[in-house]
Amino acid sequence: MNISRHPELLDRLAASYALGTLRGGARRRFERLAREQAPVRAAALVWQSRWSGLTELQELAQPSSHVWTRIHNMVDAEKAARTMEAARSGPQGLPADNRGWWHSLLVWRGAAAVGAIATVAAVAVGVQVHGALKASSGQQIATLQQQLQATPQIQYVAVLSDDKAAASMLVTFDPKNNQLVLQRVGGFQEGADKSLQLWALPPSGGPRSLGVLGQEKLLTLVAGESDVRQVPALAISLEPKGGVPSATGPTGPVLFKGELIQRTL
Amino acid sequence: MSTPDADSELMNLLDRIAMQDDTALKRLYERTSSRLFGLALRVVRNRDAAEDVLQESFLTIWRSAGNYRASLSPPMAWLGLIVRSRALDALRKRTSDRADLMNELDEDLAETLEGDSTNPMDATEASEQAFALHQCLTRLENKQREVVSLAYLRDLSHGELAEQLKLPLGTVKTWIRRGLEQLRACMARYA
């Protein structure tokens, strides 16, 4: 039977199907017809939409306030886990040339917005580097945070990420030894004729060079606390081999950037 | 009825949530949580369970807001379907965990059908399609409206409704059939 020629019957079956009261063999027959005939499928969709209105008509009720707190915590944990996942897999290719980006207010706003997540991610990535990280539960992050706080020589920390928010470089500042310690955590490797250069991005004035990076996985740069104090963010640009003078500012694309967080104990 | 402004605000929030903007999620929660919690409560009938459902639903919204536009649905209807789906999951799990609990709940349910006391509906923020449904539902007898609503919201068969409402199967079938016939005629006018 061509059910499309019986609109009354089709409408009744579609309404019962979408309500959920059409069951058993009748339901399976209707589903088969819907797969075969678009008008049947359409009738079912119309009634599914109509019944969905019932979800909008229920009385209001107030959930207790801890529900939002739980949602918020879980969303935070999920974001941190994703950042760590990105850190494991490394950057997916080079970001586009974005010279002059530090003039943009948006960058600073963005940096502030990811601050909280970056704090968690920095801690997690830092410990991962030492081979201790197995998973990313909130419990473990809390433990890791305690471990980091128990390591007194690290005073500033930054996770520099590419434009896809994949963490690529972990930077820590050790004031005792006047050292910036850089750890490559992504898979990025510059070409033999290029160098990566680290820049401080002070609140006013242009970027200030903190040094040129070698090819090693773990490397250190000499820096005084005055170089990093009150610097809100760091960036790494791709430059000709050997880098460029600080006064000229970055000439190549900025590959990684991130907020510099001062540990306040 | 909902205004186009209210809908476009929700749609804008869903777009931002798809971009992982958690301030938009908070705003969406403020705008919709009491409506969605009311729905969850109606399905699972227990505050703790309904709060779990609401939490699960917002995590689902956080992860799948990017799929919203393709659904071509009014935003509240899309959100409502997520909550109903999570609530039905919870209901099935609880039914299998605690068969005895259902018996207590059935007593409450049976009482709501006696006399004229039914669950009130609220169409103040409803989408156009929900507003039409509301108009048509108000023309049904209370008992018809209640069994049709419960069949949908709790995904119950004729047999399950009869059992939960302690009514003869034939009675439930008749109420639903008559309710459906009237609704179909009424909804056809709204196209």
Image (cartoon, rainbow, N blue to C red):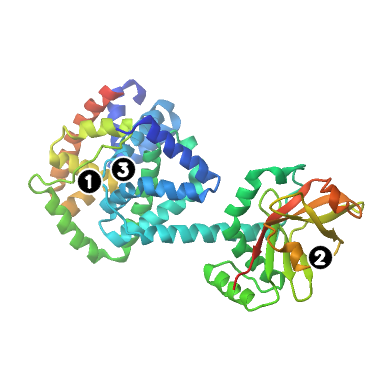
Q: Which residue is mark 3?
A: A55
Residue A78 in sight in this render? yes
Between the residue at mark 2 and the residue at mark 3, the CA separation in whole angstroms equals 55 Å
Residue at 24 percent of width and 29 percent of height: B184
Q: Secondary structure at mark 2?
A: loop
Residue B62: image location, x then y, percent:
48, 50
Q: Are marks 2 and 3 on the same chain?
A: yes
Subunit bearing disc 3: A
Give the Cα separation between the discs numbered 2 and 1: 67 Å
User: What x and y, as percent, mark residue A9?
Assistant: 28, 27
Q: Indicate the quadrant containing the C terminus of chain A: top left, top right, bottom left or bottom right.
A: bottom right
Dot 3: element: helix
The quadrant of the picture occupied by the N terminus of chain A is top left
Residue A166: x %, y % from top left: 68, 54
Q: Is residue A214 left or right of residue A87?
A: right
What residue is disc 2 on?
A217
Q: Label 1: chain?
A: B
| Residue B158 numbered mark, or none | 1
Residue at mark 3 shares a chain with residue at mark 1: no
Residue B178, given in percent of the width and then of the height, sits at 17, 34
What's the residue type where badge 2 is placed? Lys
Amino acid marked by disc 1: His
Establish if A73 lies above or below B155: below
Mark nearer the viewer, 3 or 1: 3
2 or 3: tag closer to the N-terminus: 3
Q: Is residue B175 left or right of residue B51?
A: left
For the residue marked with disc 3, what is the amino acid?
A: Thr
Residue B45 located left or right of residue A251 = left
For label 2, count other residues whose C-alpha is less than 10 Å away and answer few (under 14), some (14-19) or many (20+): some
